[in-house]
Amino acid sequence: MEQAFNDHRTDVFMNLCNDLTSEQKAEYANRAYENQNLDILSNLIYDLPHDQVLSLAQKAYDDQRIRYFEIIVYELNSADIAKFRTQAKKDGRNEFYSMLEDY
């Protein structure tokens, strides 16, 4: 599994990760974010608890990684989205604000 992750072999990794715990999936999701592996992150995001999703969304917002944020935002609730929309408007991050207007 580790080799598939390191080689960005999303198909193999996802087939092997079914037996992982929530904590392990969260760890891999954070590593995928750090290693810029959008494919694995986008597949793991659906299995993460809300606090982990919110943490990754905040990290993507802070790092101004709009593509990552766009993937993560699907798993946020309406209150979280409203908060990010307000923050994006305040920060003048028009790309984020425009994207969040659709939610």
Image: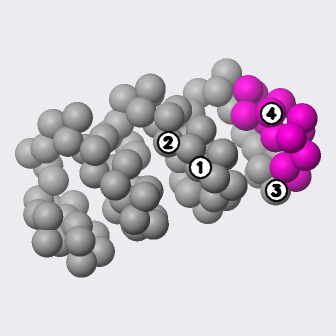
Q: Is residue 56 above or below residue 31?
A: above
Q: Which residue in the protein does label 2 denote? A: 56
The CA distance from mark 4 to mark 2 is 16 Å
The secondary element bearing badge 3 is classed as helix
- In the rendered image, residue 46, in percent from the top left (x then y), is placed at 38, 43
Q: In which image quadrant can residue 82 be found? A: top right
Q: In which image quadrant can residue 47 be found? A: top left
Mark 3 or mark 4, which has the lower sequence index? 4
Q: Which residue in the protein does label 4 denote? A: 87
Question: What is the three-letter code of the residue carrying label 2?
Answer: Leu
Mark 4 or mark 2, which has the lower sequence index? 2
The CA distance from mark 3 to mark 2 is 18 Å
The CA distance from mark 3 to mark 4 is 12 Å
Q: Are marks 1 and 2 in contact (CB under 8 Å)?
A: yes
The CA distance from mark 1 to mark 4 is 13 Å
Residue 40: image tag: none
Task: Look at the image and say whether residue 29 sits in the magenta stretch.
Answer: no
Is residue 43 at all visible to an observer of this figure? no
Q: Residue at x 35, y 50 (%)?
A: 29
Q: Is residue 14 above or below residue 55?
A: below
On the rendered structure, is 55 left or right of 16? right
Quarter of the image with the C terminus in it: top right
The CA distance from mark 1 to mark 2 is 6 Å
Q: Residue at x 24, y 78 (%)?
A: 7
On the rendered structure, is 58 left or right of 24? right
- In the rendered image, residue 80, in percent from the top left (x then y), is placed at 64, 27
Magenta range is: 82-94
Q: Which residue in the protein does label 3 denote? A: 95
